[in-house]
């Protein structure tokens, strides 16, 4: 830069790559590289991070919690208020109210009120008609003062989502002396929060609420983590996404961004932040002074739409959105509370499957007026409406229709069955590409597709089962047929498999563009980000985004080599690879590029599924004849079918079983039955009765794991001395014309070898990190060693190896690299098939986080 002419300095700096390190009181984050945009964003995020490190957020949370506790101590013993507040908050109660429900209702009511007080105090700085709190506190009846003044704000200024709900809560309180005293304490709390100017000035109140609500004692639901939201929206709203010309406010105002299950608005706030960043950068490039006030107005009044079934969540969304620009008086916000259940059996946002415009009922059951009048005149229809969208961002509810995880589990039992039936009928009538078995997330994805414009984008937080689950196949087909997947982000961090707060379930981030025309050749790549460190701060998220943005497309699978390393100084945050979307969309599952944290293992798995042995540093070093498992065997009955036909017996019967999968007792390939079954004489409640004659003929000696805990267990497949059924294993029965005894032994060796395990893990359904499942339709197509292509001497040598090793104990999977039995299995397979030593793959697999639960 010293050699550049002064008048060229800005443009030269704009095109320069910088090495940036962050130094704060908490230490050095190390050097990362990026352009001037990256430096700008990093400085902004570092400031927020410093504020958090100085405990401003923690201090605000503690102050709010203490103030809310004081109110809670008074009103939780007032059953009348609790009942009224529950109705106002849209919380459905059934039977006797539990103490935890009372606490939750009381706390969220107090949070709504104190939040309105905080916003009133801030608004008073910019609006002459709004009184500061100290004037309200001078009134002998704070209840009446708040009610009257909030009515005035609603009539003259609006901020309906913030003050309407809070006023309804206030009107539900009695003017008892203790209640008035607690309310004054709450107003004092609001003043103390506002005095923490840093928390408000740097837009951190959203994070205060986020941390406060992470505790189940408030809303009791899951929300996207702030770093995950930042990363997802940065990817979805990259510079060239949705539109060019981000400096043009008129064009920004035409954008429509919605979250159909917005909760407290974490994803919508991240979207607003990403749009703001794009606008500022675009203005800087052409030396245009930005109009941030107008931008915030457009975002709040025109661009952002939020929908949820919890009025209290929308109340907080409105607050965090408005606090981005408290000096701007917004005429309206497109935030809608939609009923769930009730006399009309409403389905929340899923009602948009019926109509774009919903005539909703208010909190007390009356039909909402279609138009409303404020002090500024008549405003548009208040009926909930969904526009055509440029971006739909969601972390939809993940409840499923199997096990104890009930669809619509928050509504009373008497309504739930009808709602489930209505949803099933709605999905069928609309021919939606969604399975209710997968859960509400699949239906919400199909709903988003209905209102997304061609060229628009989906940005979703979903269970990792999306990429491999059988029930998610209709959703994958929807994405194959109408979208181009741009990003898949998976966490391989054993400390956090998830991107939502308060859950340990494995999740992914997905960005997909709706097809409107043939994409350019260089745009037909799916970028897969395998995180070694799930970001814990917005700085980490921004670093990952800029590493992807400022570098060439990550190395492609299979042609390229290595991976794009995502670095924060000397710490590796993950690796990124790319794959042709044209190829990937032809796969039944998309687990393969996300199966492992180490890209070398992904390449090895990719080639192995093509029948090729690939070794790091050597390339393809051998060929292996593979076939689908179902060309050799038939898999036995589902676990549910076993329980619908049998129960365990206390004494020996004709029906031998292999029950459970105890890692301490199941450590050899050769096993004997450990239980017996007896047929059920009649069906269990709400279940069909399975005929024994349909189940028992499917018993087998070979058992393939139906589920595994990879960090403790040792075997993927075992062989019993006689045919059995099982509750945790798939019985495997060879097709009759095949040499069963010999083939059983060889299949045992193959599936317990490193190559067999890599193949299996590339087809797993991941529930919670190391807790995985193998579904029947997936296993039936699993590529395995084609036993029918082996010569007689190969068959004999492999069967003999099983006879030698079958009763020797194997170590848990994390110790496979030092397991002599597994080493002998691999050595035998390599020798008989004429392959080189592939010990390196076993070493890499042993250190995979999903296997050993240790970070790389």
Image: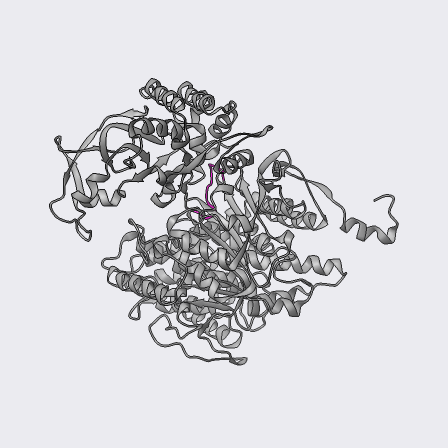
Where is residue 80 shown, x and y percent of the image?
A: 28, 64
Up-down: is 664 above or below 760?
above
**Rendered image coloring scheme:** one colour
Instruction: From the viewer's side, name the closer residue of 242 and 747.
Output: 747
Residue at image coords 47%, 62%: 448
Q: Visible in this render: residue 238?
A: yes
Q: Is residue 263 left or right of residue 437?
A: right
Tell me the quarter of the image containing the N terminus. Answer: top right
Where is residue 677 shown, x and y percent of the image?
A: 16, 36
Up-down: is 9 above or below 750?
below
Residue span colored magenta: 492-502
Q: Is residue 166 left or right of residue 807?
A: right
Residue 826 lies in what quarter of the image? top left
Residue at image coords 59%, 55%: 197
Up-down: is 589 above or below 532?
below
Q: Is residue 628 left or right of residue 38?
A: left
Where is residue 404 shown, x and y percent of the image?
A: 29, 49
Q: Main secondary structure of the magenta part?
A: loop
Q: Visible in this render: residue 665?
A: no
- Number of numbered discs on residues: 0
Q: Determine if the magenta segment contains residue 10.
A: no
Q: Is residue 540 left or right of residue 477?
A: right
Where is residue 592 shown, x and y percent of the image?
A: 49, 41
Instruction: From the viewer's side, name the closer residue of 250 and 685.
Output: 685
Instruction: From the viewer's side, name the closer residue of 458 and 724.
Output: 724
């Amino acid at each position: 830069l010293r050699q550049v002419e002064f008048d060229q300095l800005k443009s030269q700096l704009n095109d320069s790559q910088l090495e940036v390190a962050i130094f704060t009181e908490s230490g050095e984050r190390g050097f990362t590289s990026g352009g001037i945009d990256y430096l700008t964003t990093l400085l902004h995020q570092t400031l927020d991070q410093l504020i958090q490190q100085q405990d401003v957020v923690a201090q605000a949370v503690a102050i709010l919690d203490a103030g809310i506790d004081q109110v809670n101590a008074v009103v939780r013993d007032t059953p009348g208020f609790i009942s009224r507040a529950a109705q106002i908050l849209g919380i459905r109660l059934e039977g006797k109210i539990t103490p935890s429900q009372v606490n939750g209702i009381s706390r969220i009511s107090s949070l709504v009120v104190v939040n309105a007080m905080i916003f009133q105090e801030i608004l008073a700085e910019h609006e002459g008609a709004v009184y500061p709190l100290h004037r309200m506190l001078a009134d002998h009846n704070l209840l009446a003062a708040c009610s009257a003044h909030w009515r005035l704000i609603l009539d003259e200024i609006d901020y309906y989502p913030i003050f309407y709900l809070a006023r309804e809560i206030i009107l539900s309180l009695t003017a008892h002396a203790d209640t008035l005293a607690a309310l004054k304490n709450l107003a004092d709390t609001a003043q103390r929060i506002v005095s923490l100017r840093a928390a408000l000035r740097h837009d951190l109140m959203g994070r205060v609420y986020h941390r406060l609500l992470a505790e189940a004692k408030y809303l009791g639901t899951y929300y996207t983590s702030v770093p995950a939201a930042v990363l997802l929206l940065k990817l979805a709203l990259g510079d060239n996404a949705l539109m060019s010309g981000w400096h043009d406010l008129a064009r920004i105002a035409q954008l429509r961004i919605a979250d159909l299950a917005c909760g407290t608005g974490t994803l919508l706030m991240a979207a607003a932040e990403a749009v703001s960043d794009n606008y500022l950068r675009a203005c800087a490039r052409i030396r245009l002074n930005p109009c941030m006030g107008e931008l915030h107005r457009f975002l709040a009044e025109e661009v952002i739409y939020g929908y949820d079934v919890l009025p209290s969540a929308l109340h907080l969304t409105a607050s965090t959105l408005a606090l981005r620009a408290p000096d701007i008086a917004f005429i309206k916000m497109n935030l809608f509370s939609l009923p769930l259940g009730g006399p009309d059996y409403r389905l929340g946002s899923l009602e948009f499957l019926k109509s774009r415009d919903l005539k909703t009922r208010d909190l007390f059951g009356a039909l909402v007026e279609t138009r409303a009048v404020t002090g500024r005149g008549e405003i548009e229809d208040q009926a909930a409406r969904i526009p055509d969208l440029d971006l739909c961002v969601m972390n939809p509810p993940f409840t499923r229709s199997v096990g104890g995880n009930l669809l619509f589990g928050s509504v009373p039992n008497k309504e739930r069955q009808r709602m489930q039936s209505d949803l099933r009928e709605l999905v069928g009538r609309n021919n939606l590409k969604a399975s209710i078995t997968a859960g509400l997330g699949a239906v919400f994805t199909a709903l988003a597709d209905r209102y997304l414009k061609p060229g628009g984008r989906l940005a979703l937080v979903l269970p990792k089962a999306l990429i491999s689950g059988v029930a998610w196949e209709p959703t994958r087909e929807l994405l194959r047929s109408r979208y181009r997947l741009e990003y898949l982000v998976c966490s391989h961090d054993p400390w956090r498999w998830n991107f939502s707060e308060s859950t340990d379930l494995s999740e992914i981030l997905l960005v997909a563009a709706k097809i409107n025309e043939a994409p350019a050749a260089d745009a037909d790549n799916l970028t897969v980000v395998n995180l070694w460190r799930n970001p814990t701060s917005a700085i980490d998220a921004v670093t990952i985004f800029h590493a992807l943005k400022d570098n060439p497309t990550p190395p492609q699978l299979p042609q390229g080599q290595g991976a794009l390393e995502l670095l924060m100084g000397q710490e590796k945050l993950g690796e990124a690879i790319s794959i042709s979307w044209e190829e990937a969309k032809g796969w039944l599952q998309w687990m393969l590029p996300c199966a492992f944290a180490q890209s070398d293992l992904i390449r090895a798995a990719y080639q192995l599924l093509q029948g090729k042995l690939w070794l790091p540093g050597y390339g393809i070093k051998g060929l292996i004849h593979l076939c689908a498992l179902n060309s050799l065997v038939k898999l036995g009955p589902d676990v549910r079918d076993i329980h619908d036909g049998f129960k365990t017996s206390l004494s020996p019967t004709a029906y031998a079983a292999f029950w459970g999968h105890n890692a301490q007792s199941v450590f050899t390939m050769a096993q004997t039955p450990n239980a017996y079954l007896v047929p059920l004489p009649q069906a269990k409640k709400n279940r069909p009765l399975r005929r024994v004659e349909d189940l028992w003929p499917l018993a087998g000696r070979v058992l393939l794991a139906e589920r595994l805990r990879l960090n403790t267990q040792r075997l993927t497949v075992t062989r019993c001395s006689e045919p059995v059924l099982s509750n945790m294993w798939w019985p495997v029965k060879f097709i009759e014309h095949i040499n069963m005894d010999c083939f059983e032994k060889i299949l045992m060796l193959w599936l317990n070898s490193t190559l067999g395990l890599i193949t299996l893990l590339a087809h797993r359904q991941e529930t919670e990190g190391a807790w995985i499942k193998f579904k029947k339709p997936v296993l039936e197509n699993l590529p395995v060693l084609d036993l029918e292509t082996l010569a007689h001497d190969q068959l004999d040598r492999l069967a003999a190896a099983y006879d030698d090793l079958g009763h020797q104990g194997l170590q848990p999977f994390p110790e496979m690299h030092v397991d002599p039995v597994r080493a002998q299995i691999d050595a035998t397979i390599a020798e008989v098939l004429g392959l080189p030593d592939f010990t390196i793959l076993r070493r890499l697999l042993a250190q995979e986080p999903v296997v050993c639960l240790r970070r790389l």
